[in-house]
Amino acid sequence: MIFAPDGKEKTNGMRLRRAQQLLLLAAFAAFATGGCNQKTAADAPAGDAPPAMHVQVQIAKTVKIPETTEYLSILKSRHSAAINPQVEGQITKIFVKSGDHAKAGTPLLQIDPLKQESSVYSLEASRAAQEANRQLAQVSLERAKKLHEAGVISKQELDSTQSNYDSATAQVKALDHQVNQQRVELHYYTVSAPMDGIVGDIPVRMGDRVTVSTLLTTVNEPGALEAYIYVPADRSKDLKLGLPVRLLDETGSALDETRITFVSPQVETDTQTVLAKAAVENPRAKLRIAQQVRAQIIWGVHLGPVIPVLAVLRINGQFFAFVSVKEGNTSVARQKRLKLGDTIGNDFAVLDGLKPGDHVIVSGTQFLQDGMPVTEQIQNDGKSASGR
């Protein structure tokens, strides 16, 4: 009974010491865990910068860039004839069709000649009657001369007979001229080719009535042509003979190269343009009369940089390119806005935004961003060389 309280206290003390030991173990474990975490965070390596992108570059070079302007041009024959009738009447025959090759003097169309033929026959009959009167007057004159020599008639009667003969002769000559004139006009009723050439469109038909202002057809000599170029008046001060001209098709391919051969001294009032002509030899007849082509006038040549077509980006209607720029010890890509001119082969002429010697990036441009580090590989004439 004496030792009961002491045993109970002993048991409680042991429990308290065990609880304290557990608390110390838990605190030590927590401290150890926190220390390890702090050490791990402290000892972790810092994040690496993004690696430089490998790109191929070309050094912008200086070339001769032509200053050009394109205008719409119409080709016309240098030897072409518009066929209009010289008489009025109804078309009765058409001897040719469009595209036929006609030699000089070949009949093309026939205008009804019946009325004119009737006039010619009437004049010829009048001339024949007047010729009979002239012959009678001649016989009378010869008789009168003999009678006058014999003293049968007076000098006055002889003079009167002479006058009748002279009048009859003059009338015959006048009728001769009229007959010849009407025969020439009768010839006009058959419309003939004035030169060798190809017959153009024939807008008239048999039965149509034509006048001297009616266009019947055209005859064009194949081969040589002229390009009619209409240049705005404000640019006409630069026009001069001998300027190079390049004729282009709808795809931009060159058809022929020539030079300005004529510059009009006046301005067209309706269009405010100046006509310039350029001779086109057209030896193989590839170009046709009245064909419309693009005429590129070369005003001059200047030196400037070019950029490959594949290196140009178009964003919202603006043209851009990436160039490699040295900033400190690193090469970075910088985006530049460009003002471009015409194409020269596989390159664009650069009017603004690029200098000769710039390192133009020509590969991987779709993956680049402004300021991105790059590693260059320089291209020259299709060969690659390591760069910066």
Image (cartoon, rainbow, N blue to C red):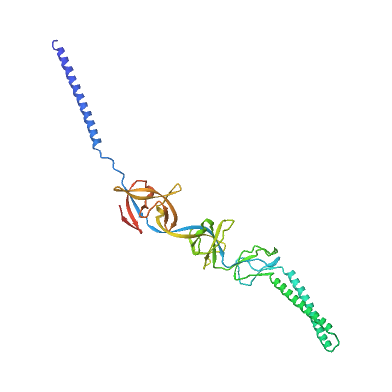
Residue at 18% in and 24% down: 21
Residue lying farthest top?
Answer: 1
Q: Which picture quadrant has residue 268? A: bottom right
Measured as percent of width and height from the top left, residue 355 is found at 38, 53
Q: Is residue 212 above or below residue 369?
A: below
Q: How many marks?
A: 0
Judge whether 274 appears above or below 136 on screen: above
Which residue is the extreme one toward the right? 152
**Relative to 267, 155 lies left or right:** right
Residue placed at 47% from the left, 58% from the top? 68
Q: Quadrant of the N terminus?
A: top left
The residue nearer to you, when weighing 379 against 126, is: 126
Say which residue appears at 54% left-offset and 66% top-offset.
Answer: 225
Tell me if residue 138 comes above or below residue 362 in the rendering.
below
Residue 202 picture location, percent across and down? 64, 64
Q: Position of residue 224 (x, y in %)?
A: 54, 67
Q: Nearer the viewer, residue 150 or 174?
A: 150
Does residue 275 appear left or right of residue 310 in this picture?
Answer: right
Residue 301 in view:
yes
Residue 250 shows in the view: no
Q: Residue at x 81, y 84 (%)?
A: 141
What residue occupies the far front of the structure in this picture? 155
Percent x, y for residue 120? 74, 73
